[in-house]
Image (tube, helix red, strand yellow):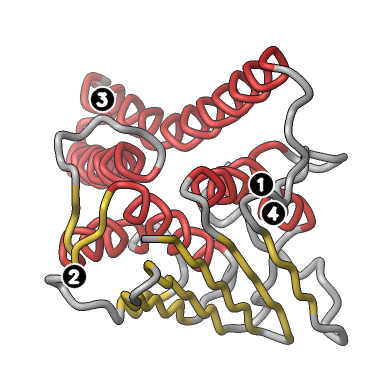
Amino acid sequence: MSMDDLSTPNLSNAETHVDTVTADAAPSPASPEGLELRAHDLATQLVGKLCHDFISPAGAIMSGLDLLEDPSAQDMRQEALNLIKASATKMVTLVHFARVAFGAATTSEAFNGGQLEKILSDMYTTMRAELDFAIPANMLFQKPAARALLNLGLLAGNSLPTGGKATLEATATDDGLVLTAEARGPRARLKPEAVEGLNGLPLGDGLNGQWIQPHWLYSVVQDAGGTLDFHSETDALSFKIILPA
């Protein structure tokens, strides 16, 4: 799955779509065994997505190395070096994003807005959308909020397959934290699989790779006891996450 694959003009241009996801929106498993199976399936799908994301730059690095070792392709040495550099940069960008957005492999217990902006800005260099990170650099986010914000930013950018602007904002309240994203651009849409994921629904007949990241965002918000709303109209999408204090 490429980073653009979560978005497509599959929702009607003539209708407005509104969905709300809350911490208890999805049915609870009937038993601890059911919960374990669900967690296992979620991990399997997430690992599959990461492998798919990583294989492209990794393969490009190998292709560049093959060119460097090919005696008949020495006139392409500079092109090979450029390919290796660009692909290695993309791989590092994906890993830095994934370890905060999907994993726990970091010693940081909190991140400031500047750190999260850098992670997301690097990710947006692999996408067509433009990022407007309208969040103060010194604003602090605990791990669950940081994870939610990064995934929200990724989803907003991926909903703009032909370009546009994704604007992220965050507001601290007495009750918790409000995260919002607005994606505006031609063909701004969510695929049906992404809508299923955001609603906490199991994957239907669609593609796993376009379902898992929205479902992961839903799971992050659910685990934090928060709510997630999203709204679509012609060439625009808006998202709102409320996380309790």
Q: Position of residue 104 (x, y in %)?
A: 30, 32
* Label 4 Cα neighbours within 10 Å, binned few <14 / some 14-19 / many ≥20: many
Mark number, residue 210: 1
Q: Name the residue carrying label 2.
A: 139
Q: Position of residue 61 (x, y in %)?
A: 30, 31
Q: Earlier in the sequence, mark 2 or mark 3?
A: 3
Name the one closer to the observer, 124 or 180: 180
Residue occupying image coordinates x 48% and y 75%: 181
Name the one closer to the observer, 220 or 96: 220
* Residue 85 visible somewhere in the drawing: yes
Disc 4 marks a residue whose amino acid type is Ala
Mark number, residue 194: 4
- Distance from the alpha carbon under mark 1 to that under mark 2: 31 Å
Q: Quadrant of the N terminus?
A: top right
Q: Position of residue 189 (x, y in %)?
A: 69, 71
CB-based contact (under 8 Å), mark 4 and mark 3: no
Residue 29's image quarter?
A: top right
CB-based contact (under 8 Å), mark 2 and mark 3: no
Please state which of the two labelled residues, at mark 4 or mark 3, is closer to the viewer. Answer: 4
Q: Earlier in the sequence, mark 4 or mark 2?
A: 2
Residue 161 against residue 37 in the figure, above or below: below
Residue 188 against residue 84 in the figure, above or below: below
CB-based contact (under 8 Å), mark 1 and mark 4: yes
Q: Earlier in the sequence, mark 4 or mark 3?
A: 3
Please state which of the two labelled residues, at mark 1 or mark 4, is closer to the viewer. Answer: 4
139 sits left or right of 183 in the view: left
56 sits left or right of 24 in the view: left
Disc 3 marks a residue whose amino acid type is Leu
Q: Position of residue 11 (x, y in %)?
A: 81, 71
Q: Name the residue carrying label 3.
A: 65
Q: Earlier in the sequence, mark 1 or mark 3?
A: 3
* Label 2 Cα neighbours within 10 Å, binned few <14 / some 14-19 / many ≥20: few
